Image: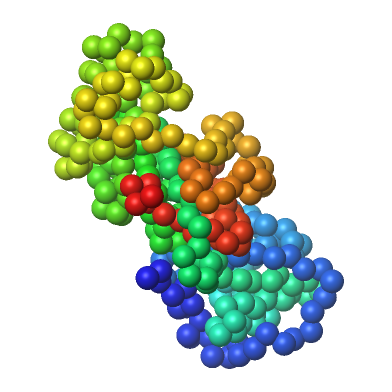
Amino acid sequence: MRRNLVFIFLLILLFSGVGAARTDSVMEKTLLPFSDELYLPLRPVTEFFGLPLHWNPIEQKAYIGNQGIEGELFAGTFYVSVVELAIAINGDLKWSAEKGGGFLHYKDRSIDLKLPRPPERENPPLVYLTFDDGPNEGTPFILDVLQAYNIKGTFFLIGENILTNPEIAKKIIQHGHQVGNHSFTHSLMPTLSPRAMRHELELTQNAFRVIMGVEPVLFRPPYGGWSPELRDIYHEMGLKLAWWTIDTKDFNKPGARVMVDQILREIEPGAVILFHCKLSTANALPAIINAIWEKGYDFGVLLEK
């Protein structure tokens, strides 16, 4: 069962309702569950409230005016506890644990707060999150987001990167995610000889066994390059082709809004969404996950299809 996200506000006994006066200046934000607290991204909130914000690189701390506030650098964005933020700006925080919603009010502006929620109906249609080209410097941020939302994904890893980043590779398995073969050097496979194609797959399978203690059964060819000769090779090795149905083209850094719009246009039951292990993708993932949940879908694991 997915964990109950309403855990932090047990301590906030003073914030007992969601019935205070509202204004026309309202922004909606979904809280991010992380490290057993609920967080908001600091910069867009302070901009909305018109508060001065600066970063002290020596202290590694943010300041709202002269008021220091600590938080977490999460997926490239500085997040702060919604409770600590309310205290720092002397804002009015109202929350209903029963409804899983509330708001943060400051002067003439309010931010609607809500928890990310998977669909409540039984057996919602599933979609699948997949991440190519790791393990690399972006992979830990992706893992943090997925852990925060208690979602499992599939990581198609490059053999060379497994050898270069063994600790990150092991972390993927420790977090309970699925892995797949994405070749050893990320070459366009049909341009290689059959012997070289087999060598790419075998070297990667060996890297998985030696470094990670697993042997994947899924294979995704780099760039989607396919040929009958390649098919014969991965079939002989007992590998299954893992394609995608939605290509976010996140290597172009389109931003969260563009990716959300595209995914919601193309989403359907069983959709396999292609991402890459990039910091910009990790940054966009919370908005993408929340939008998919609000559309009525939940997340599955490829081999359980």
Q: Position of residue 122 (x, y in %)?
A: 48, 70
Horizontal relation, residue 222 to residue 232: left or right: right
In terms of image quadrants, where is residue 217?
top left
The vertical placement of 279 against 66, above or below, is above
Q: Who is closer to the viewer here, 87 or 111?
A: 111
Q: Position of residue 268 (x, y in %)?
A: 57, 49
Residue, far right:
24
The vertical placement of 172 against 46, above or below, is above
Quadrant where the N terminus lies? Answer: bottom left
In terms of image quadrants, where is residue 183?
top left
Residue 286 in view in this figure: no
Q: Who is closer to the viewer here, 228 or 195?
A: 228
Q: Who is closer to the viewer here, 169 or 187?
A: 187
Residue depicted at x 72% and y 76%: 105
Q: Position of residue 7 (x, y in %)?
A: 45, 78
Horizontal relation, residue 153 to residue 203: left or right: right
Horizontal relation, residue 253 to residue 198: left or right: right
Q: Who is closer to the viewer here, 107 or 63?
A: 107
Q: Position of residue 287 (x, y in %)?
A: 59, 54
Residue 249 in view in this figure: yes
The vertical placement of 68 against 238, above or below, is below
Horizontal relation, residue 58 to residue 305: left or right: right
The vertical placement of 73 against 222, above or below, is below
Residue depicted at x 44% and y 75%: 4
Residue depicted at x 84% and y 71%: 24
In terms of image quadrants, where is residue 93?
bottom right
Residue depicted at x 79% and y 84%: 21
